[in-house]
Image (cartoon, grey):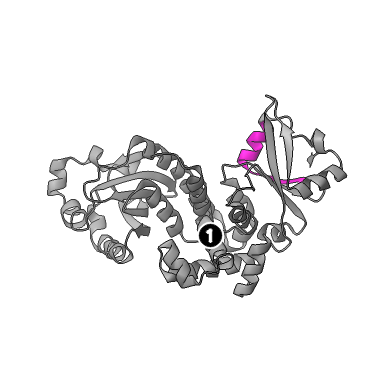
Amino acid sequence: MPRDDSRLDALIEDIYAAALGDTGWEDALHGLRRLTGARMATLLSYDDTSQLASIDRAVGDDDAWMASCHHDYSAEFYLYDPGAPVIGSWAPGRWFEDHAFVTRQQRARSVFYQEFMRPNQLGSISGIFVHRHQGDSAFLSLLGGPGSQGLAPAQQRTCTALGAHFSHALRIQARLGQGEARAALAESTLEGLPTPVFLLDERRTLIFANLAAAKLMASEAVLRFVRGRFVPEVCSDDAQWREALNRGGIQLRRVDGTKLILALMPVPAHATLALQQNRNVTLMTSIHLSTSGARQTRLQLFYGLTASEAQVAIAVSCDGLSPTECAEARCVSAGTVRSQLKSIHSKMGVSRVADLVRLVLAT
C-alpha cells in the first residue's frame, strides 16, 4: 500500500476525535476501510472470560448490507467467529490473518465461513488486537470481498501503527469523564498529530507542545526557550515577533544548515483552542499554510473539526453547496452530512449557516 501522509494524518485525527466523543468511531473506521480497500471494518469488544467478541461499531461499502451483516453476527455468528478463541492470550499489537490460522479444510466445515462469510460476499479476515483493559479488550477487524487473501505486509505495518493510535484513543475514552472531555480536547487531538504543534500565549510562553514538537525541541537547539519563553535568535524581541506574526511565519536555521520554517497562526478568540485557554493564543506548527488545504488545516486545529467535517464546512461555506448537494459530491447520505453539520455547529459555536460561513471565510 503506497504511503499517503495526508490520508493517514486525517485518519489519526478522526481516531482521537472519536475518543473524545466529537464524532463517532464510524469516521475512523471508514477511513481505515478506504485506506486498506477492505469491504467491512469493525471495532469489536472481546470478553476475556467468555472468549467471545461483540461488535461495537461497524462500517461497510453499503449501509443496508452492513446493517444486515451486523444483525446476523450479533444474533448468532459471534458464537462461531474463528478469531475469538485465537486471540484470547494475545498482547496488544499482534496481527491476525485468517488464512494463517484457519485452513481451507476448516473453512469448508466452518459455520462462520459457509453461512456468514460466503453468503455475504466476504473472503478474508484481517485484524489487530489493539487494546486490553480490565478484562474487556478490543479487536480491530478488516474483512475483504470475495477472493481477497488478506492484507499485504506493507498494509499490515500501516494498520499496526494505526492500531497503537486506536489503543491510545480507547484508553482516553475510558478514563475521560463528561466534564474532562471538553477540557482535554485540544491536547488530546493535537497530541495525536505526527506534525510538531506548539501553543504559545501572548508573551510567547509555551503552553503546550505535542510529542512531535517535544522531539523537535530536543533535536534542534535553534528552537530556543528561556524560562519557558520562545526567544529564537532571529526573533528575540516583541517587535520582531509582531513582524513574524504579520508575515504568518518564521524561518530558522537547523544545526545542519537547512531551513526550519514554522507557520504562526493567531488563534481566533472564539475558536475552541482560545476558549479553553481563556487567553490569546498563537499556534506554531511546521504544517505548510500556503497550500490549497490551508483553510481545512486551520479549521481542524482551531475548532477541533475532523478532516471530513472541515471539508463539509468548506463545501457549504465556500462552494455554496446545500447539504444534499454536498452529500452527492462526497458520495455519502444526506443524513451523514446533516449529522456532520450538527457537530460542526457545536464545535464552532454557531447556530446558523450564515454564522458558519462568516467563520469559515475568516479562517
Q: Quadrant of residue 121?
A: bottom left
In depth, the one of 38 and 127 nearer the eye is 38
Q: Residue at x 18, y 58 (%)?
A: 119
Direction from residue 271 to residue 5 in the image, left or right:
left
Direction from residue 205 to residue 170 in the image, left or right:
left
Q: Give the x, y percent position of residue 148.
A: 25, 45
Q: Give the x, y percent position of residue 128.
A: 37, 43
- Residue 22 visible in the displayed image: no
- What's the residue type where badge 1 is placed? Gln
Direction from residue 283 to residue 323 in the image, left or right:
left
Q: Determine if the magenta segment contains residue 205.
A: yes
- Residue 27 visible in the displayed image: yes
In depth, the one of 265 and 277 nearer the eye is 265
- Quadrant occupied by the C terminus: bottom right
Q: Residue at x 35, y 39 (%)?
A: 95
Q: Give the x, y percent position of residue 220.
A: 69, 30
- Quadrant occupied by the N terminus: top left
Residue tagged 1: 311
Q: Residue at x 30, y 67 (%)?
A: 64
The image shows residue 214, relative to residue 273, as above or below, that is above
Mark 1 neighbour class, 10 Å CA radius: few under 14, some 14 to 19, many 20 or more = many
Give the extent of the magenta segment: 204-218
**Number of marks in the image?**
1
In depth, the one of 321 and 198 nearer the eye is 321
The image shows residue 316, relative to residue 55, as above or below, that is below
Q: Determine if the magenta segment contains residue 254.
A: no
Secondary structure under badge 1? helix
Q: Residue at x 61, y 39 (%)?
A: 212
